[in-house]
Image (spheres, grey):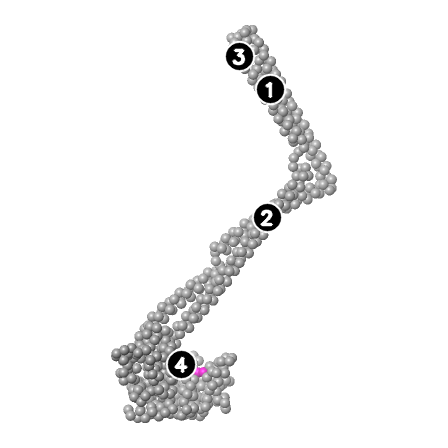
C-alpha cells in the first residue's frame, strides 16, 4: 500500500491542507507545534476511523482532542492510496452528527463499502492496534517510574506472549478465567439451591416425624380413656378364670380315679386267673369303687363347665344389653363416640403422615444423587472453559516461542545493520529480558544508552512489521531519530531506503533530509 495524497479539510490545528507523497523515503519537516503529530493522527484516523469515548473517557479521547473549535461540521478529510495496482479514494467525515465514510476505486468507479470490511481487505486485515505496534513509530516512551529498558521489554512481550499482533492471549485468558469463575459461581449457586431444596424436604420430614410422635402419644391417651369407660374387658372375667381352674382340678381327679380303677380291676383279674371270686376280690371291689368315683367326678366337672358356659353367655348378653342402654344415654354415649372418632382420625392422620414422610425421604435421595439439567450443563461448561484455558496456554507458549525466535532473527539483522555490526545479535530471552551480543559478551538492555534502546525499539518494530503484516504498509516515523547520533542515523536511513516500503518521516530538524541527499 502507498499513500499518494491527503487533503485535510478540518482536523485539529490543520485545515484546508493538501500534501502529496512519493513511494520512497520522504521527510516532512516542521518545527515544534507545527502539526506533525496532528498529521500523523489524521492518517491513522483516515485508515481506521475514530470512535468517541463514553462518559469521562470522552473528554480525553482522540475525537475530542482533534475536533476543530471552528466549523466542527467540517471535521473531515480525504486520503488517496494505491493498493494491488489500483487507485482508491477514501473520504471520511468525523462530525458528531454527519459521520460517514466512502471508498471508491478511481480506476473503474466502483464504490466499495467501508462498513462491510472492504477497506480492511485492502489493508491486508491490518487493525489499528497492529498498526500502532509496528509501522506507526514514535519515540520509545516509559510510564512514570518505569525504566526505558523495562518499557522496551514490555513492548517486545506483546509479540512473544501473544504470538504477534492483535492476538491478545493474556486478554483472552483473562476472559476465559472470568467466564469460568462466572460458571463456577452459577454452578455453586445451582448446587446450593439443590442442597437447600433437599434440606427443606428433610426439615419437612422432621416436622412430620414430630407430628407422628405427637399423634402416637395422643392415640395412647385416647385408648386409655376408652378403656377407662369399661369397654376393654367383660365383667366376671376373673371369676371365669377361677372357675375354669376349679373344674380343671375336678376333671383331672376324675380321670385319675378312672385310670386307677381300671388298673386295679385288671390286676385283680390277673391275680384270680380271670375267675370270680378269688384272692383278688377285695382289690377288685376297691378298683370298681375308685373307677365309679372317677366317672362321677368327671361327669360332674363336665356338667359344671357346660352350666358355667351357658351362664357366661347369658351374662355377656346381659352386659351387652346394659352397654347398649348406657350408649343410649346422651352424655356418656357422645363421649364414647367422640373418643372412638378421634382414635380413628389419629390413626388415619398418622398413616397419611407416614406415607408422606416416606415419599419425601425418597425424593431427598433422588435430589442428592441426581443433578438437574442446568447443573449438568454448568458443570460441563466449567470443564470446557478449564480445558480451553489450559489449551490456550499451551498454544500461546508454543506460538510465543516460535514468534520470539522469528522476532529475534529479524530484529538482530536490522539492529546489526543500524549499528554497523557493533552488535551482532539481539536476544529476547524466555523471561522476556532483552540483551545484545557484541561478539565478546552479552550486555543487558538496562546497561545500554538511550539511543541504543531507541535503535532496539526501532529494530523490533520493523521486524514485527515484516513478520505480521500481509500487505506492506507505509512506515510513519514521528521524531523517531531524536536520540540517534549521525553515524547510526545514516545507517538507519540507508536500511530504510533498501526496503520496499513507503517511508514518511516527520521531524523537527533537517538532519534526515541532509543525510538522504548524500545517497
The residue beneath circle 2 is 212
In this rendering, the answer to whether 368 lies above or below 402 is above
The span from disc 2 to disc 3 (Cα, nearest Å) is: 73 Å
Q: Is residue 60 visible?
A: yes
Which label sits in the foreground, 2 or 4? Answer: 4
> Dividing the image into 4 quarters, which one contains the N terminus?
bottom left
The residue beneath circle 4 is 142
In this rendering, the answer to whether 312 lies above or below 402 is above
The residue beneath circle 3 is 267
Mark carried by residue 72: none
Label 4: element kind: loop
Are dots 4 and 1 in contact, CB under 8 Å? Answer: no
Label 3: element kind: helix
The span from disc 4 to disc 3 (Cα, nearest Å) is: 141 Å
Horizontal side, residue 412 vs residue 88: left or right: left
Are dots 2 and 3 in contact, CB under 8 Å? Answer: no
Between 342 and 28, the residue placed more toward the observer is 28
Q: Which residues are magenta?
A: 46-50
Q: Is residue 417 a member of the stretch shown in magenta?
A: no
Label 1: element kind: helix
> Dividing the image into 4 quarters, which one contains the C terminus?
bottom left
**Residue 2's x, y, as percent?**
35, 86
Q: Earlier in the sequence, mark 2 or mark 1?
A: 2
Mark carried by residue 254: 1
Amino acid at each position: 500500500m502507498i499513500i499518494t495524497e491527503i487533503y485535510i479539510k478540518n482536523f485539529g490545528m490543520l485545515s484546508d491542507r493538501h500534501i502529496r507523497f512519493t513511494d520512497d523515503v520522504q521527510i516532512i519537516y516542521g518545527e515544534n507545534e507545527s502539526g506533525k503529530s496532528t498529521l500523523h493522527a489524521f492518517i491513522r484516523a483516515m485508515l481506521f476511523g475514530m470512535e468517541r469515548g463514553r462518559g469521562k473517557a470522552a473528554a480525553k479521547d482522540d475525537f475530542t482532542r482533534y475536533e476543530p473549535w471552528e466549523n466542527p461540521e467540517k471535521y473531515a478529510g480525504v486520503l488517496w492510496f494505491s493498493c494491488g495496482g489500483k487507485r482508491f479514494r477514501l473520504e471520511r467525515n468525523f462530525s458528531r452528527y454527519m459521520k460517514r465514510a466512502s471508498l471508491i476505486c478511481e480506476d473503474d468507479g466502483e464504490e466499495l463499502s467501508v462498513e462491510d470490511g472492504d477497506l480492511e481487505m485492502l489493508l491486508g486485515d491490518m487493525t489499528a492496534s497492529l498498526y500502532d505496534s509496528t509501522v506507526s513509530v514514535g519515540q520509545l516512551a516509559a510510564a512514570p517510574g518505569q525504566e526505558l529498558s523495562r518499557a522496551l521489554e514490555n513492548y517486545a512481550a506483546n509479540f512473544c506472549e501473544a504470538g504477534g499482533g492483535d492476538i491478545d492471549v493474556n486478554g483472552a485468558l483473562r476472559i476465559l478465567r472470568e467466564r469460568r469463575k462466572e460458571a463456577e459461581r452459577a454452578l455453586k449457586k445451582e448446587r446450593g439451591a439443590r442442597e437447600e431444596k433437599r434440606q427443606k424436604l428433610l426439615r419437612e420430614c422432621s416436622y412430620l416425624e414430630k407430628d407422628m410422635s405427637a399423634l402416637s402419644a395422643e392415640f395412647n391417651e385416647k385408648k386409655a380413656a376408652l378403656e377407662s369407660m369399661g369397654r376393654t374387658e367383660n365383667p366376671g372375667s376373673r371369676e371365669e378364670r377361677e372357675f375354669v381352674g376349679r373344674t380343671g382340678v375336678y376333671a383331672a381327679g376324675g380321670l385319675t380315679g378312672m385310670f386307677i380303677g381300671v388298673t386295679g380291676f385288671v390286676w385283680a383279674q390277673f391275680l384270680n386267673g380271670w375267675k370270680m371270686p378269688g384272692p383278688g376280690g377285695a382289690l377288685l371291689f376297691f378298683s370298681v369303687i375308685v373307677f365309679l368315683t372317677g366317672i362321677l367326678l368327671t361327669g360332674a366337672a363336665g356338667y359344671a363347665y357346660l352350666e358355667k358356659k351357658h351362664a357366661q353367655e347369658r351374662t355377656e348378653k346381659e352386659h351387652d344389653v346394659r352397654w347398649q342402654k348406657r350408649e343410649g344415654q346422651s352424655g356418656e354415649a357422645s363421649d364414647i363416640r367422640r373418643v372412638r372418632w378421634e382414635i380413628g382420625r389419629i390413626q388415619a392422620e398418622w398413616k397419611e403422615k407416614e406415607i408422606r414422610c416416606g415419599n419425601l425421604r425418597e425424593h431427598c435421595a433422588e435430589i442428592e444423587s441426581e443433578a438437574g439439567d442446568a447443573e449438568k450443563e454448568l458443570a460441563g461448561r466449567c470443564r470446557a472453559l478449564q480445558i480451553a484455558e489450559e489449551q490456550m496456554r499451551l498454544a500461546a507458549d508454543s506460538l510465543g516461542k516460535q514468534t520470539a525466535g522469528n522476532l529475534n532473527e529479524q530484529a538482530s539483522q536490522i539492529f546489526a545493520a543500524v549499528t554497523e555490526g557493533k552488535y551482532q545479535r539481539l536476544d529476547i530471552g524466555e523471561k522476556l529480558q532483552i540483551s545484545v551480543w557484541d561478539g565478546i559478551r552479552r550486555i543487558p538492555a538496562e546497561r545500554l544508552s538511550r539511543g541504543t534502546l531507541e535503535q532496539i525499539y526501532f529494530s523490533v518494530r520493523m521486524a514485527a512489521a515484516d513478520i505480521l503484516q500481509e500487505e506492506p504498509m507505509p512506515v510513519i516515523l514521528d521524531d523517531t531519530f531524536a536520540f540517534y547520533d549521525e553515524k547510526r542515523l545514516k545507517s538507519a536511513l540507508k536500511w530504510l531506503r533498501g526496503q520496499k516500503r513507503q517511508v514518511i518521516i516527520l521531524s523537527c530538524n533537517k538532519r534526515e533530509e541532509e543525510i538522504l541527499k548524500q545517497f
